[in-house]
Image (tube, coloured by chain):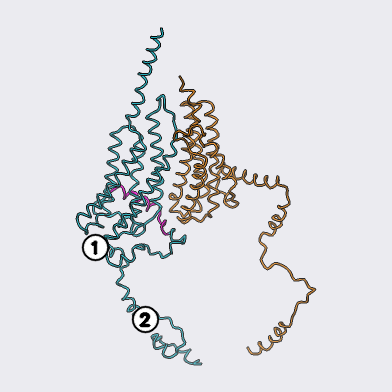
Amino acid sequence: MAEVDESSKPLFAGLSDVSISEDIPVEGEISVPVDSPTQDDEYSTLDEPVKETILRDLKAVGKKFVHVLYPKKSTALLRDWDLWGPLLLCVTLALMLQRSSVDSKEDGGPQFAEVFVLIWFGSVVITLNSKLLGGTISFFQSLCVLGYCILPLTVAMIICRLVLLGSEGIVSFIIRFIVVIVSFGWSTFASTAFLADSQPPNRKALVVYPIFLFYFVISWMILTFAPSSSSSTKTVGH
Amino acid sequence: MAAVDDLQFQEFDDAENLLAVNHDATTISIGDSNENSKKQRKSFRNVPKDEDDDLLGNEESDKTELLAGQRKSAPFWTFEYYQTLFDVDTYQVLDRIKGSVLPIPGKNFVRLYIRSNPDLYGPFWICATLVFAIAISGNISNFLLHVGGPTYHYVPEFRKVTIAATAIYCYAWLVPLALWGFLMWRNSKVMNIVCYSFLEIVCVYGYSLFIYIPTAVLWIIPLEWLRWVSVVCAMCLSGSVLVLTFWPAVRDDQRRIAVATVSAIVILHALLAIGCKTYFFDPPEAGNQIQSPLPSTSNVTIKSASQKT
C-alpha cells in the first residue's frame, strides 16, 4: 500500500500549482440541461407577436375542452394544467346565472360574486379533501380538472337560456331538466375519469361524493334559473 | 492486534463484559440486555396506553386529553396533522353513518365506531350535504305549494343557503365546543368521568346530523302530519344515539347535573330540527290561503261589471 501512495504522490502533487491563465475562457453549465430546447423557446416567446401568444393559449384551452367532451383516461389534462379555461368557464357561467338587478326586492337567484365564489371555493375545498384523504394529485392539477369539467354545465346553461327565450311552460321545463341531467352526468363522469387514478383505492367513493355534490349544486342553480320578473308579469297580467 | 483470537469462535459475552474489555467498542445488545431496559420502562407504565383504561377515567387521561387516541404526534400547524384526521376508508364512514342512525342500547358510538380514530370527513360533508338538502327541499316544497297562485313568482332563494349553512355549521361546531368545555370543567370536579376529546364530540355530532338529510327530502311532501312524524322519528333516533354516547360521561356526576346536561343535548337537537322545518318550509295552509282571494276578486269584478250595465 505504501508503494501506491508514493507513486500517486507525484500525480497529485502538482495540482496545487496549476493555475488557469486568464486568456482561456472558462464557462459552461454544471447542471444537466433537461429541457434545453424549451429554454430557447422561452427566450423567443418574448419577441413573438401578441396574437401568436394568445392563439397558442387558446389552442391549449381548446384542446382541453375536446378532452373533456370526450373523456378518456389520458394524462394530457393533468400534465399541462392551466387555469385559463376554468376562469373563462366560471366567468361565463356566473354572468349567465346572476339575477338581474330589477328584482332586488325579493330573495332571488345568486349574484355574480356568489356563483364565482361558490365555484372556486368549492373546487378548493374538494381539492383539499382529496389531498387530505391521501391523493397524489397536485393542488393546481385538481383545480384545473374540476374547472374544465364545468364545460358541459356551461353548455347546458346556454341551451337553457335559449329555451327560456322561447317559452316558459312545462315543456320547456322538461327539456331543461333533461339537458341539465345529461350535462351533470357528463361532468361528473369526466372529472372522475381524470381524477380517479390518483386516489387511494379504498377511498375512491369518499373522493367522488364531494365532486358529485359540487356539480349537483351547480346543476340545481342552472335548472332553477328564473328569468327576470319583467317578462313574467306580462303573462300574469290583468 | 489479537489476530489469533479473531479466528477462534468466541461465545458472545454480555455487553457489560465486552465493554469492560474494550471501552471504545460499539456494542449492540440483543436479548438478555432487554432486562435493563425493562426496568427503566416500568416507571412509565403508569400512563395507560390502551383505550380500555380510559373507560376507568384515569387521571392521566386528563393530561393526554387533546391527543386521546391520536397516537400521531404531528404538530397542529403541519399538513400531516390534518391528514391524520381524514384517515378513514369508505367502509368505515358507512359504518359510522349506520351506527349513528341505529342506536344500540349499551353500545357507545364513540367506543364502538370511532375507536380513537375521529375523522373530520364525516362531520364536514354531512353538514354540507344537509345545508344543500334543506335549502333545495325548502325551495321545491314552497314551489309545489304555491304554484298556480296568481301572485307567485318563482325565485330560487339563494340567500337561504347561506343562512342554513351558518346555522348548521354553528350547531355542529359550537355545541360540541361548549359540551367539551362543560365536560372538562366537570371532570376537574369529579375525577372518574369518561373523557372524550373535542374531535370525538365533533365527530359524534356530525354523524348524528345524518338522519336529517332523508328527513329534509321527506319534507318536500306538503303534508303537515307527515312532516311532524318524520321529524319526531329522526329526533328520537339520533337523539338516542347522542344520549347513549354522553350518558356514561355524566352519570357519575350529581344526578341533577347529569340529567340537565343530557336534556340540554336533546333539546338543542330538537330545536335545530324544528327551527329548520319552520324557517325553510312553509306550512301547507299558506298555499290554500293564497288560492282563496281569487273568488272574492272575481266577485268584485262581476259586481262592478253588472253595476255598469
The percent coordinates of residue B18 (x first, y second) are 42, 88
Residue at the spot 51% in from the left edge and 50% down from the top edge: A195
Horizontal side of residue A92 vs B166, given as left or right: right
B215 versus B205 height, above or below: above
Chain A drawn colour: orange
- Residue range in magenta is B84-102
- Chain assigned cyan: B
Extreme residue toward the top, this view: B309
- Disc number placed over residue B190 in the picture, else none: 1
Toward the viewer: B292 or B140?
A: B292
Label 1 vs label 2, nearer the camera:
1
The percent coordinates of residue B304 (x first, y second) are 39, 12
Query: Is there one chain holding both mark 1 and mark 2?
Result: yes
The percent coordinates of residue B221 (x first, y second) are 34, 33
Name the secondary structure under disc 1.
loop
Q: CA distance from mark 1 to mark 2?
A: 43 Å
Amino acid at dot 2: Ser
The answer to if A105 sits in the magenta stretch is no
Toward the viewer: A149 or B260?
A: B260
- Disc number placed over residue B33 in the picture, else none: 2
Horizontal side of residue B42 vs A144, given as left or right: left
How many marks on residues?
A: 2
